Each structure stands twice: as C-alpha cells, then as structure tokens.
C-alpha cells in the first residue's frame, strides 16, 4: 500500500512487486538479476509521447482531465491537469464492485510541474492488482474526470522472462561470428537513431549479460542521452540474442526505407537479421514518391532475401486505421509500408498475463476460449484499447496491389480461410481482400524494463516486438550456421509451412481486434471497422506467438 508517497516492498510467491517510483528502492526482479534502483515508468514510444508528459492540450486545459493512464507491475500511473496542486484530489480505480481510492490528504503527494498553459501537470501512482482492467477517474474538488479506456497493469518484461515465455534455453548464447544482426533507425528531424552506450552497458550488466557494444553504421550519436526508442530496440535485441555482433544502422533520412536498404547493400557484410520499427502509410508513399518507390524497396527486399538476409518490421501502434497517430479518418483502412510488403516478416504486439490470473474468458464459434493452465505456456492477448492499453497493435491488408503487393502464395490458404470464416469483416471498400495480409506473427510488445538516461523505465510498442523476433532469427541462424546450414533468409514461406504441418509451434491468439487507434490528447480514438482475432491466422496477430523450441527443432 502507499503512505505519504512511499511504496512498501512486498514479496508474493517468487515475484517482487515494484515499489517506489519516486525514490530508489533496491529489489530483485522475477528475472533473477542483481539488485538495482528503479524509477517511475514513462510513456511508451518516448519520441512520440514526450509532449504528453506536461503540455499536451490544444485547448484550454480542463481541471482533472487525464492525459494518460498506464499500468505497470501492480501500479497505474495517472497523469492529469490541476489548477492548483494543493487542491483536494481523489483518484479511483474501479472494477465491478471493487473500488481502490487514494486522495492527497491522507494517502499520497502527487508530483506536479507547472505547465506553460497555466496550472500544473501532475502524476500519481496507484497500487493495484495485475491483469484487472480498471476504470480510472480523477476527482478534483467536485469535478470528476474519467479516462476513456480501461487500464491493465502487467508484469515487467526482461530478457530472462522472455526466454521463459517463448521457450528459449536460458543459457542461449550466439557463438557463430557470422550470425549478425542490426537495428535500423531514422536520422532525420526527430529521428531515433541514437543509443546511449552507458545505458546499454548498465542494462546488460544488471541483466546478467555479457557487455557488448553495437557497431554504428551512419551518423548515430552513441552517447546522446535523449533517445528512448533506440534504447528499447537495441536492448531487447541484444538482451535475447546475447553474443551476436550487432549493428546500429542509422540510415533513414530523406530517402526513407530505400536509403536504409541501399546502405545495407553497400556494407561489406550485410547483417543477417534486420529489425525496423518504422513505417509510413502506403497511400502517402505512393502519392509523394510514386508506385515505383515501393517496387524499388520490394526489389531490394527480394534481392537480399535471396542472399540469406532476413527483415523484420513492426506492424504499427494505432490499429488498422492509424487513428489518432497518422490519421483522423476511420475509412478506409490505412495500411503501413514496409509492414505490408510481402517480402518481410511483420510482427504485431501482444501482452503477457499471469497463469493464475486469466485475462480473458470468451466464446468463439461456440467454443470456450480460456487461458491455459499449462505451466509451460504464458497466455497472451493482443494489445488494444479494448484490452486495457492506451494503444492498439496494427494490421490489415495492402491496398496497393498494382505494385506487387498482392497476397503472396505462402499465406494464401491461411488468409482465405480467415476471410471465409465466421469472423465479422469490414465492408469490401474498407480494404483490398486480394492484398498482402499482415502481420505474420505477434510477440510481446508491452511493459519492457529498459535503461534510459541512467534510470529504469517502462516502454513498449510493436517497435519492441520486431527486434524481439529479429533476435529469434539470430538464434536460429546461429544454430544453423554452427551445423553448416545456410541462414534463414526470407523466413515467411518457412513459417507458414511450419504452421501448416505443426500448428503447435504457435500460440494462437483468438480474442481482440484492432479497431481502435491510440489515446491522443486524453481522448479515445476508435473506429467502427477493423480486423478481429479468430482461431488460426488473422490480420491482428498473424499465426500467433512462436515457440522457439519447436521452430529450432524444425529448422
């Protein structure tokens, strides 16, 4: 519980509860790593969310209005506006008949900072149980305000926990020097090609990993302390596939994705597994650069795929329409490129729930879908505003089939089965049923524990899922190269073949949709149409989450 802003350390079973987000507390995480200080979580997608921390209103601020409420490890952080930080404030988390209340007279001292728009932006931390979808409200004096979506707190995610979740040996280590990998980032205005060596080394030391330093390609500034997106990508990748030679390729400027691909092609030795957490609407690329631009990028993907190079792309963080991020329109869908390319592996985001605290119970086609009790399986559900998050995993169908974006043969049977299922679909003019469907897979994209600017923070997005699967490919390549086998290269045909002969290689996610976008300016952005999960392949979570032990056994 909380008393005067101080969290108490509590141990339940084998898990420690994260305690003091305001002062440093020393704890041991579920990952079994060494003690280290932990500070309060910040917003996901840091480069896009920094404006939400204090000054994010386009209009006159409303007292008590909640900008962001996000959950992490038995707590929910609530950011809201106040005219006077001394005003009486009550924060309530409610779930059914359960009400958890805190007020600043007896329970907590909100942390407030003056806003350029007048008044103060404040945040407070409310303790709660994990995996319960709470309604969040703030009452200042007699004025109530409600966050537009439910909020769920989930466990911190660390490399060791990821290995446990996805059946990767705990002692896995890349030993083959040719099993290389790379993270690509932008170097334009607001680009995110910067990583911090000190943060990376601290992360690896505290996670019990060997200290390594990526090789920088381009103009990245490896000691700039300001970038959180790059910290997320590089720490996840290097945390799971430790030992691999890793590159930070900063090459997405005015030439966007083609510039990145050409930089890779000019390298003496192209990294075998490449992750990109960036995208642009197909319609923007075709209208500003022409259809031949996508053709040129796809040709590079094809050429390097045939050379044994793999590409993993994030599916986007604002649903099928990118509503609230790149668009304020719900019709038609807004597919993202290169996520929609048939020649890359696209990954969406799920989040992990506890074995003993199921996050859903539903019926699909008359079949009861519940969380498994198998101690070797961690149930997952798609990240969505409708599932306790303030953002939504992307997915859909390519709408520019004239540029070679038509549905590829390797997924055709799976996608046609999906389209012919009892799942409810949007109208035909919302999407192109003949286009390439994405994502191909999903992996955890929520609540990663990373080091940024010398402190620990929570981050996530499909930009976490992509480097995670790229690290899977690195581990597969290491296994194969050590046995005189070629690298995986373009992996999609193999993945869908495995799904056809050994569906148990994937954990099927059957509940959720991507109709919503993301919270922006404290408002919920959801649409009538989007795509829904279903048994088997779907355009929200693809084939599901992969089980590494089965993949490597069949690799």
Image (spheres, rainbow, N blue to C red):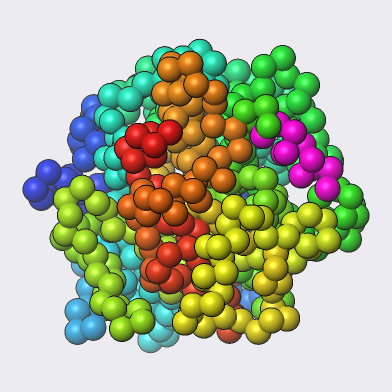
Q: Position of residue 419 (x, y in %)?
A: 56, 74
Picture quarter with the N terminus: bottom left
Residue lying furthest left in this view? 13
Q: In the shown orientation, is residue 487 left or right of residue 328?
A: left
Asked if 150 appears above or below 52 in the picture, the reply is below
- For the question of whether residue 240 can be seen, the reply is yes
Q: Residue visible at 87% across and 55% down?
A: 291
Q: Residue visible at 37% across and 54% down?
A: 503
Q: Residue visible at 49% across and 73% down?
A: 532
Q: Nearer the viewer, residue 372 or 349?
A: 372
Residue lying furthest front in this view? 501
Report the number of discs: 0
Give the residues in magenta. Answer: 295-305
Q: In the shown orientation, is residue 338 left or right of residue 138?
A: right
Q: Nearer the viewer, residue 177 or 111?
A: 177
Q: Position of residue 535 (x, y in %)?
A: 40, 69
Q: In the shown orientation, is residue 234 left or right of residue 116?
A: left
Q: Is residue 290 magenta?
A: no
Q: Nearer the viewer, residue 138 or 194?
A: 194
- For the question of whether residue 62 can be seen, the reply is no
Characterize the magenta stretch by its predominant secondary structure: helix
Picture quarter with the C terminus: top left
Asked if 493 appears above or below 208 in the picture, the reply is below
Q: Residue visible at 67% across and 45% down?
A: 343
Asked if 168 appears above or below 12 in the picture, the reply is above
Q: Is residue 296 magenta?
A: yes
Q: Position of residue 287 (x, y in %)?
A: 88, 61
Q: In the shown orientation, is residue 553 left or right of residue 120?
A: left
Q: Position of residue 204 (x, y in %)?
A: 38, 24
């Amino acid at each position: 519980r909380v008393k005067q802003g101080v969290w108490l350390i509590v141990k339940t079973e084998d898990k420690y509860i994260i305690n003091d987000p305001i002062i440093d507390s020393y704890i041991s995480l579920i990952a079994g790593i060494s003690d280290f200080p932990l500070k309060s979580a910040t917003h996901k997608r840091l480069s896009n969310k920094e404006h939400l921390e204090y000054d994010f209103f386009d209009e006159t601020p409303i007292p008590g209005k909640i900008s962001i409420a996000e959950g992490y490890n038995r707590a929910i952080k609530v950011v809201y506006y106040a005219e006077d930080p001394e005003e009486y404030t009550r924060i309530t988390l409610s779930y059914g008949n359960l009400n958890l209340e805190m007020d600043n007279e007896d329970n907590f001292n909100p942390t407030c900072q003056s806003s350029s728009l007048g008044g103060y932006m404040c945040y407070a931390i409310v303790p709660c149980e994990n995996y319960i979808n709470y309604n969040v409200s703030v009452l200042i004096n007699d004025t109530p305000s409600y966050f537009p979506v439910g909020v769920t707190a989930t466990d911190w995610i660390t490399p060791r926990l990821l290995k446990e979740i996805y059946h990767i040996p705990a002692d896995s280590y890349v030993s083959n020097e040719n099993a290389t990998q790379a993270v690509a980032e932008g170097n334009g205005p607001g680009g995110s090609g910067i990583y911090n060596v000190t943060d990376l080394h601290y992360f690896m030391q505290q996670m019990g990993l060997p200290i390594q330093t990526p090789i920088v390609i381009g103009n990245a500034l490896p000691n700039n302390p300001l970038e959180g997106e790059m910290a997320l990508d590089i720490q996840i990748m290097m945390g799971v596939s430790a030992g691999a030679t890793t590159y930070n390729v900063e090459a997405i400027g005015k030439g966007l994705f083609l510039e990145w691909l050409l930089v890779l092609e000019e390298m003496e030795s192209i990294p075998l597994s490449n992750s990109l957490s960036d995208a642009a609407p197909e319609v923007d690329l075709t209208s500003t650069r022409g259809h031949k631009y996508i053709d040129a990028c796809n040709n590079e993907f094809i050429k390097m795929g045939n050379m044994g190079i793999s590409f993993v792309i994030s599916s986007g963080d604002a649903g099928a329409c990118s509503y609230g991020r790149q668009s304020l329109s719900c019709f038609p869908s807004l597919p993202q490129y290169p996520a929609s390319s048939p020649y890359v592996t696209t990954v969406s985001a799920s989040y992990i729930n506890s074995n003993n605290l199921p996050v859903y119970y539903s019926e699909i086609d008359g079949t009861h879908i519940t969380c498994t009790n198998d101690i070797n399986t961690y149930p997952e559900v798609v990240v969505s505003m409708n599932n306790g998050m303030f953002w939504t995993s992307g997915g859909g169908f390519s709408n520019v089939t004239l540029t070679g974006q038509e549905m590829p043969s390797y997924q055709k049977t799976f996608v046609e089965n999906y389209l012919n299922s009892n799942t409810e679909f949007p109208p035909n003019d919302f999407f192109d049923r003949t286009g390439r469907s994405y994502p191909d897979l999903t992996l955890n994209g929520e609540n990663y524990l990373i080091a940024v600017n010398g402190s620990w923070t929570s981050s996530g997005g499909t930009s976490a899922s992509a480097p995670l699967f790229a690290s899977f490919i690195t581990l597969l390549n290491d296994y194969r190269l050590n046995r005189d086998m070629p690298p995986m290269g373009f992996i999609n045909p193999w993945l869908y073949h495995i799904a056809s002969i050994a569906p148990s290689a994937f954990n099927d996610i059957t509940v959720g949709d991507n109709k919503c976008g993301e919270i922006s300016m404290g408002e919920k952005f959801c649409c009538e149409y989007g795509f829904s999960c279903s048994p088997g392949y779907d355009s929200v979570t693809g084939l599901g989450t992969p089980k590494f032990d089965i993949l490597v056994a069949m690799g």
